[in-house]
Image (tube, rainbow, N blue to C red):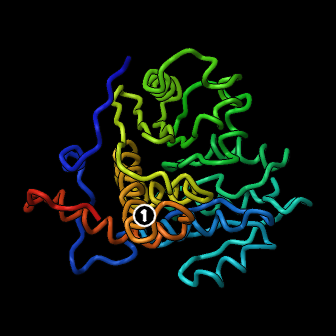
Amino acid sequence: MTEPQIIDIESLRAMPLPQWNDESSKADYGKLLVIAGSRRLAGAALLCAKAALRSGCGTVRVAAPQSVAPLLGIAVPELMVISLPETASGTIARAALPILEEQFAPCDAAIIGPGIDADDETDELLRELAAKIPLPTVIDAQAIYAIGDGESGAHKWPRVWTPHEGELAPIIGKKFEELGVSREDFAANFAREKNSVLVFKGRETLVAAPDGNLWKNTAGTRGMGTAGSGDVLSGIIGALLAQGMNVAHAAVWGVHLHALAGESAAKELGDDGMMASDFLERIPVALRYLRNATSPAEKPRAGLRRV
């Protein structure tokens, strides 16, 4: 079995966050394109985009169906909203492709999938986007199903896949447990074959890179197994990519930051009934802790309690 490295302060110190100074501005903090949302699942787009802002991204552009795009802008005034043509079912139509292509050049990273509803036309669009976006891109939620179905081979551009076991069937053609392999070996093989980073979600999420590096996250809490948690994670990873982090490093940091934000929420609220929006709001606190703890000028004191 492939042995993973546990994600901790020492491992994060080896892949430091971008350093900013007092002259830094939103232009330095990256521009993220989030292609997300549908009439039925507008909240997922909101969670993802807000998590990206809470993770320090300078500008977040949310491209969403025209029936929900204005509502997202009202809910979070800090967002830049792009209204897209939609299908009869209220998800993004294939006619949106030229509009989306115009957004590639001014952006530094992208996320596709959160809150996008199942639709054959939209799935075709998602497959085209996965092949065309020339940016580091997080592939999440419905995009996993759409792109994994019938797609093979390695990606040309940097990609981060974020499935849990239940989302793998369209990619591997069977249930994960039918493979007869460990999570670690599967993650390592997937990353190598797809030339992508895999965030294999679970109680102990794995991050696998194409070069063979493998990490395991042991932080977090059971309360994070709730609706919208994955949307928040994608937003965090996307924000770190937009800020210029290495693709694998952004995934490792994102997974651990997500987990510590969840721990912070559970400490105050308890695990029962915790919502994704609860730990989303604690991302800045967790990020401050990790930035201070991994700074070359500071080492954690003995007994330092996590957020």
Foreground residue, 132 or 262?
A: 262
Tell me the residue at 59%/34% (across/down): 165
Residue 156, given in percent of the width and then of the height, sits at: 53, 35
Tell me the residue at 35%/51% (across/down): 253
Residue pointed to by mark 1: 266
When asked about the image quadrant of residue 239, the answer is: bottom left
Three-letter amino acid code of the residue under disc 1:
Ala
How packed mark 1 is, by other alpha carbons closer than 10 Å (few <14, some 14-19, many 20 or more), is many
The answer to whether 161 is drawn above or below residue 262 in the figure is: above
User: Which quarter of the figure is the N terminus placed in?
Assistant: top left
With 112 as the anchor, is 259 left or right in this view? Answer: left
Residue 212, given in percent of the width and then of the height, sits at: 36, 25
With 23 as the anchor, is 85 left or right in this view? Answer: right
User: Which quarter of the figure is the C terminus placed in?
Assistant: bottom left
The answer to whether 141 is drawn above or below residue 105 in the figure is: above
Foreground residue, 61 or 204?
A: 204
Q: How many marks?
A: 1
With 303 as the anchor, is 17 left or right in this view? Answer: right
